[in-house]
Amino acid sequence: MSEKTGDVVIGIDLGTTNSLAAIVGKDGPRILTREDGAALIPSVVSFLDDGGHLVGEEARARSVTHPRSTVHSVKRLMGQHLEEVRRREGDRLGYEVVATEDSELARVRIGDKLYTPQEISALVLREVKRVAEQALGHEVEQAVITVPAYFDDSQRQATRDAARIAGLQALRIVNEPTAAALAYGLDTSREGTVVVYDLGGGTFDVSVLKITQGVYKVAATAGDTHLGGDDFDHEIMDRILHAVRDHVSATATIPVEALQQIRLSAEGLKRQLSERQDAHLEIDLGLDEPIAFRITRQEFEAAVRPRLDETLACCRAALKDAGVTPDQVDEVVLVGGSTRIPLVRALVEEMFGRTPHTELDPDRVVALGAAIQADVLSGGNKDLLLLDVIPLSLGIETVGGAFAKLVTRNSTVPARATEMFSTSVDDQTSIEINVFQGERELVRDCRPLGAFKLRGLPGMPAGLPRVEVTFLVDADGVLTVKAREQRSELEASIDVVPSHGLTRDEVKDIIRDSIKEARSDFAARELIELRNKAHNLATGTRRVLAMPEMPFTDAQRKDIEDDLARLDTLSKGEDVAALREACDAFGDKTQALADQAIGEAIKAELNREQSRLPS
C-alpha cells in the first residue's frame, strides 16, 4: 500500500499505560515515532491552570507535582459506574472521580470541570494522531483501534466516541489479542491453533485463534478488564504504605502527592524485579534517617500469584469454549508489558508445555497488528481475513426479568440471530424490547444496552401475536435490533447505543466544541511546546556558559546572556510568533556553541588522562 494522503489508515493501540500508532508501508509494518524517535506515548493527560493541557511524557512528569489535575489509567474508567471504580481503584488514582445527577457513569473532575473518560481518551488519541501525521507528513482521518477482547459493548462504544471526538473515523474496533496474532503471522505461513495471552497495564485477555490459509478465526476469548500491571503496582504500593505508616502512624494520612510518587516508585520496583532478585527504595520523610524499603522477587511473586492464577483460569475457560486442550495448541504468544514478569512466562510455559513467543516487543505488537488490519481494510492486503468474536452474549428481557440470549458469546462477527416471541397479556397493543448484554440468566445481573417499542399492534389474545426479533452485529461490532409482528407486519428497530456510553447528542456537542475551539487549542498547545523548547535551550546554554574550559570573551558572554534574557521574557508572554522566531534564531546561534562545548570537554578529558600518565 502506498503512503499517500487520502488512502492511509493507521493502526492504533490505545493502551492503559501507553499508546502508539503504526502503518503498513512499502517495506511492511512500522511504528510511527515522535521527533525524538520514541514510539510510546504515555496515556496520561495533565490539565494546566490556564485551561491548556499536556499529553504524554510531560503530563506523566506532572503526576507527582500536580496529581489532582493529571489523569492516568483512564482506560479502566471507560464505560464504568462510579461505584465500580471506587471499589477497584480506591484512593490510588490521585485525581477525583465522580458521577453526575443524571448518570452513574464515572467522570473525572478537574477543578470546576467534568470530563468523561471518552473525552480524556480523545486527548490521548489526538496526540497519537498528531505524532502519526508528523511522521507521515500529511493528515490522517481513519484508523483501526484496538480494545481488550473482553471490552463489552458500552466500552467499545466509548472507544468509538473517543475516536470521533479526536477527529478520527474508527473503521474497525479490533480485539488486542487478535491484532497481536496478525502481527506474529506476518512472516510465516503458520497454520493451526494459536493462543494469545495479553497482560497489559490495566487489562487481561486470552484468545484462542484458528488460522487456516490466511483466515484468522477467533474460536474463543476470555479475560478481565480490571486485571493488569496497575494491580501489581498496587501490591507493592500497599507494602510501601504499610512500611511508611509503621514509622509514622498507623492512621497517618498520606498526601496525594506522596501517593503518586509512591505509585511511580512501585512501578519502578516492579520493573527492577523482572531483571533481578530484589529491589530497594529509600524514602526520606525528614526523620532521623530515611525509611529503607526492600522487596524480593519471591515476595512480589507471592503477592501477585492469586491474580496470575485468575489469568490461568481464563485460559482454561477459553480453551474449553474453543474445544481444545493445552497440548493441541500449536503456538502461544505473549503480549503486553506485564508479560515481561518472569513468573508470568514460567506459568504460561508450564500450562501449555511450550515456550511462548516473545520475539516481538510486547508493547508494540498490538499496534503492528492493528496496522495490518488497517491495510486489509484499505485494500492493501487481500490475503488475510480476520473473523473476530463477540465477547459477551446479547439478548432481550422476557417475562419475569429473564434474559433470552439471541447471540451467544464467542459468536463470529458479523453475526445474525432471529427468534420468535409473543405477548403474555390479552389485547396488548405495544411491546417494549429491552436489550441486554451478559452471561447471567436474569437481566438484573446483566448490563442494559438500550430499549425501543413496537407500537400499534392489533389487540389479540395473549400468545397469538408472532413477534420476530432479529439481532444483527456487523463487522465493526455495531448492534442493530429489529422487531416485526408477522400478522400485522408492523416493524421497529434500534441501533444500540449503550446507556453507559455518551449519547449521540453529547458526542456531537463535544465534536462541535472541539472544532470551534480547534484554532485556539492549537495555539495554546504550540505556546506550551515553545515554552518548553525555550526552557531546554536556556538550560543547555547556561550549562555551557558555566564550563571553565570554554574560552568565552566578555563580549560573547554578554551577547549570549542578552539573548537568554530575551528568551526568558518572551516565554512569559503570549506572543507565539515572536517566541517561535526567537527559539529558531537562538537554536541556530547556539548549535555551533554546543559542538564547540563537546570538543572542549573531550580535549579537557584527554589532557587529564595525559597528565596522569607516568613521565
Image: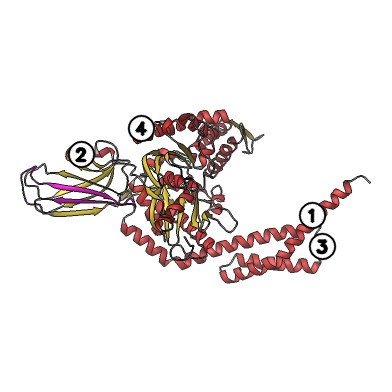
- Residue count near mark 1 (Cα–Cα under 10 Å), binned few <14, some 14–19, many ≥20: few
Residue 113 in view, yes or no: no
Residue at the spot 46% in from the left edge and 31% down from the top edge: 352
Residue 108's spot in the image, x, y percent? 42, 50
Please name the residue that numbered disc 2 is placed on: 401
> In the image, which is nearer the foreground, mark 2 or mark 4?
4
**Mark 2 falls on what kind of element?**
helix
Whole-angstrom CA distance, mark 2 to mark 1, is: 79 Å
Residue 600's spot in the image, x, y percent? 80, 58
Q: Earlier in the sequence, mark 3 or mark 4?
A: 4
Q: Residue furthest right?
A: 615
**Mark 4 falls on what kind of element?**
helix
Please name the residue that numbered disc 4 is placed on: 320
Residue 47 in view, yes or no: yes
Whole-angstrom CA distance, mark 2 to mark 4, is: 29 Å
Whether 386 is drawn above or below 590: the answer is above
Pointer 1 with pointer 4, Cβ within 8 A: no
Whole-angstrom CA distance, mark 3 to mark 1, is: 14 Å
Please name the residue that numbered disc 1 is placed on: 602
Amino acid type at circle 1 is: Ile
Please name the residue that numbered disc 3 is placed on: 551
Q: Earlier in the sequence, mark 2 or mark 1?
A: 2
Stretch in magenta: 457-485
Amino acid type at circle 4 is: Lys
Q: For the image shown, how many numbered marks are present on the structure?
A: 4
